[in-house]
Image (spheres, grey):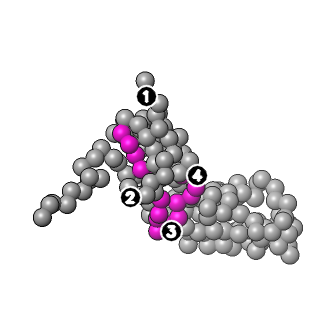
Amino acid sequence: MEEIVNRVAQSKLRTIDLEDFYLPGTRSVIDISQWLLEGLVVVESRFRESVKNTDFSIYKDHYVAIHCSTDAIVPQWIWMLLQSHLTGIAKKVVYGDLQHLESVLYTEVLNNLDLSEYQDLPVIIKGCSNKPVPVNAYLMLTEKLQPNARSIMYGEACSAVPIFKKPKK
């Protein structure tokens, strides 16, 4: 009987799983519509009082997305005021929804990633994940890998979709 050889394991092929770069920690959303008159109108004194009476310590070490779920016209100082209350408490605060928050977190991680180990190698960016990996993370990783990798594929070794192949010199 012939021995089964795992040719993928023996190849130079490298796999990157973006899920590995997911920052652990609690994600939270603050919707300011709760502090607006009828969810739509900013009344400065009322808003400031609501913010003052909020226990922001519940967001200790959280990643926080702040937004307004209604069509209210919100002045810029509102977001700045919330940031001032969350500074030193939350790990990170962004304007937007949870998807935008994940995109910002991945951007920070990927910007600091050294991809030189993938120089002239075929790379597969793993497709399936159990954690929320934003589409933007796939775009950023592709852009950062392209100058280094010989080729970039998406998916799994058994069913990879070709994305990029460096032209032969």
Percent of width and height locating residue 26:
51, 68
Callout 1 touching callout 3 (CB < 8 Å) = no
* Disc 4 residue type (three-letter): Asn
Mark 4 crowdedness (10 Å alpha carbons): few <14, some 14-19, many ≥20: some
Percent of width and height locating residue 84:
64, 56
| Labels 4 and 3: the sequence-earlier one | 3
| Labels 4 and 2: the sequence-earlier one | 4
Q: Residue furthest front?
A: 1
- Residue at image mark 3: 26
| Labels 3 and 2: the sequence-earlier one | 3
Q: Residue at x 81, y 59 (%)?
A: 74
| Residue 46 left/right relative to 19 | right
* Disc 3 residue type (three-letter): Thr
- Residue at image mark 2: 158
Q: Residue furthest top?
A: 169
Q: Is residue 134 magenta-colored? A: yes
Tell me which segment is drawn in magenta: 121-137
Q: Quadrant of the C terminus?
A: top left
**In this rendering, which labeled residue sits more in front, label 1 or label 3?**
1
Q: CA distance from mark 1 to mark 4?
A: 29 Å
- Residue at image mark 1: 168
- Residue at image mark 4: 136
Q: Is residue 126 magenta-colored? A: yes
| Labels 2 and 1: the sequence-earlier one | 2
Q: Residue furthest left?
A: 1
**In this rendering, which labeled residue sits more in front, label 1 or label 4?**
1
Occupied quadrant, residue 155: bottom left
